[in-house]
């Protein structure tokens, strides 16, 4: 059964790194679709996203080339009151999509190395596979993860190309062999605050949108 890729993030704003890893997942898994889930209130950040939900969705739609691809944006986390927990999202999606369909949560190495700080983290491995992309400059997961997380993932590793993800609904950790661009939303926001150039770090359409709507300026 073809899997569904799930891609959560704050996307404040979306950039070339996000687009590159979504493309890498599309190439590796030939999924039925990729569901992008912008976060409402990412509780671990201690602050709300700077751009409004509507602006983040508009930028995501441009960056992910909706219509031409299998990518859809799911706004459920934006409509939820209170903190955004991936566990709640995954449980809902699993109920809606059925027990059998392979789900693959796409995630960068920085976020995955800290996944044991997420709510009900060990249960996440019952609900989905994980596809991990190493962010340039990040240390290998084994050296930055806690003992508990290393114990959880040590028997779950698979390598893209030799995976059995389409045969099971959840539980594997797949390392995607791709080198994404070294770009982050934090860096883009900082550049905009300092009046520095951002072109080349994110799609031109998103760049134009940020300029037109005067997002991430010091006063906003
Ligand atoms: P911020 O700098 O605000 O923390 P970010 O650039 O990490 O943002 P998020 O929206 O938080 O972007 O990221 C969503 C997901 O995409 C996370 O799993 C993150 O690890 C991953 N990701 C973001 N940028 C990259 C990149 N350049 N390479 C690989 N993965 C990335």
Image (cartoon, rainbow, N blue to C red):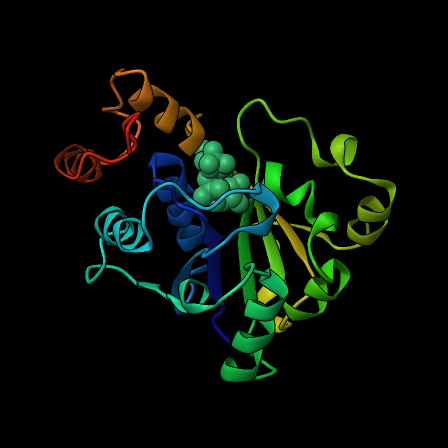
Residue furthest out toward the front: 219
Q: Is residue 87 left or right of residue 210?
A: right
Q: Is residue 185 left or right of residue 99?
A: left
Q: Position of residue 30 (x, y in %)?
A: 42, 61
Q: How many marks?
A: 0
Residue 178 in view of the camera: no
Does 96 sit above or below residue 69? below
Q: Residue at x 37, y 47 (%)?
A: 23
Residue 211, quarter of picture: top left
108 or 178: nearer the eye? 108
Q: Position of residue 163 (x, y in %)?
A: 62, 57
Q: Quadrant of the C terminus?
A: top left
Residue 156, quarter of picture: bottom right
Q: Position of residue 187 (x, y in %)?
A: 41, 24
134 or 38: nearer the eye? 38
Q: Residue at x 24, y 18 (%)?
A: 197
Q: Position of residue 102 (x, y in %)?
A: 56, 71
Q: Is residue 169 left or right of residue 214?
A: right
Q: Residue at x 29, y 54 (%)?
A: 57
40 or 90: nearer the eye? 40
Q: Is residue 97 left or right of residue 217?
A: right
Q: Residue at x 49, y 66 (%)?
A: 81
Residue 136 in view of the camera: yes
């Amino acid at each position: 059964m073809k899997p569904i890729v799930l891609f959560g993030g704050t996307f404040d704003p979306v950039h070339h790194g996000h687009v590159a890893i979504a493309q890498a997942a599309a190439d590796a898994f030939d999924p039925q679709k990729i569901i992008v889930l912008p976060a409402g209130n990412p509780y671990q950040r201690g602050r709300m996203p700077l751009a409004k939900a509507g602006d983040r969705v508009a930028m995501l739609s441009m960056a992910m080339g909706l219509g031409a691809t299998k990518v859809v944006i799911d706004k459920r986390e934006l409509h939820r009151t209170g903190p955004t927990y991936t566990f709640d999202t995954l449980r809902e999606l699993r109920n809606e999509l059925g027990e059998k369909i392979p789900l693959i949560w796409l995630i960068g190495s920085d976020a995955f190395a800290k996944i044991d700080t997420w709510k009900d983290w060990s249960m996440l491995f019952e609900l989905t596979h994980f596809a991990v992309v190493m962010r340039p400059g990040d240390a290998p997961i084994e050296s930055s993860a806690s003992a508990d997380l290393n114990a959880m993932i040590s028997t779950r590793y698979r390598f893209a190309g030799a995976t059995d993800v389409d045969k099971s609904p959840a539980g594997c950790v797949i390392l995607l062999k791709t080198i994404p661009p070294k770009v982050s939303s934090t860096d883009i926001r900082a550049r905009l605050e300092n009046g520095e150039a951002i072109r080349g770090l994110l799609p031109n359409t998103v760049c134009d949108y940020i300029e037109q709507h005067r997002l991430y300026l010091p006063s906003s």
